Image (tube, helix red, strand yellow):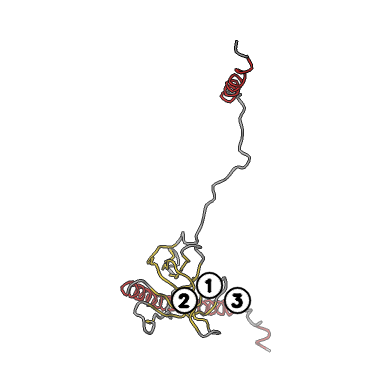
Amino acid sequence: MADPAEHRPAEEEEAAAAGEDEDTGAQVAPIVKLEEVAVTTGEEDEDVLLDMKAKLYRFDKEGNQWKERGTGTVKLLKHKETRKVRLVMRQAKTLKICANHLVVATTKMQEHAGSDKSCVWHALDFADGELKEEMFAIRFGSVENCKKFKDIVEEIAEQQGKNEDKENEEVSSAAGLVEKLTVTETNKEENVEKKDAPAADDKDVKE
């Protein structure tokens, strides 16, 4: 006759399995509730005019040499409202900003001596959180990409120059209009003052 003890493990396993499958009706809430976080890049209000892979260098004045700033994607972004264009470049893996400045009328692109795949330019850069005058060099994978980058930047700089001239004309025109209105108002006030001035008494006149 078989010992009942031999069957106990199997019976206990079945009971344990039944216990696992049994619905107790208890609801277990997650300990930590993760909420969806909106990630912003600061580029939401801008249109992309150019997006290319490149390697960026910064000229170190103290060491008198070029230092690599990072390899990644360089973009030209045009703001939808202000219409201003900025150059932004982020490192490929870390997405750290290595260049961030406006393309202005004085932005001039020059070919790097000895390399037709590279461009050199000066800019007031804000990549490190403060405005600093920097000299950059950027290298592309092909001559065509370098030429395209150079042409687009120069075209934007020229357009920004025209916009600045137009704004200056509008400011001058507005200033002239304000000055004209001010003179007109002054003349009106003077006329009113003369009209309202008290007349001399007849007695004083006779005396």
x, y (%) of residue 77?
A: 42, 66
Residue drawn where x is 44% and y is 70% of the image:
87
Identify the residue under disc 2.
57
Label disc, if present, on residue 126 of the rendered structure: 1
In the rendered structure, which amino acid carries the disc numbered 3? Asp
As helix, strand or loop, the secondary structure at mark 1 comes to loop
Quadrant the C terminus occupies: bottom right
CB within 8 Å, label 1 to label 2: no
User: In screen coordinates, is 62 left or right of 170?
Assistant: right
Camera-side residue of 159 and 53: 53
x, y (%) of residue 58?
A: 49, 78
User: In screen coordinates, is 134 left or right of 111?
Assistant: right
Label disc, if present, on residue 196 of the rendered structure: 3
Mark 1, other Cα within 10 Å: few <14 / some 14–19 / many ≥20: some
**Number of callouts:** 3
Residue drawn where x is 48% and y is 62% of the image:
93
Label located before the other in sequence (3 or 2)? 2
In the rendered structure, which amino acid carries the disc numbered 1? Phe
x, y (%) of residue 14?
A: 57, 21
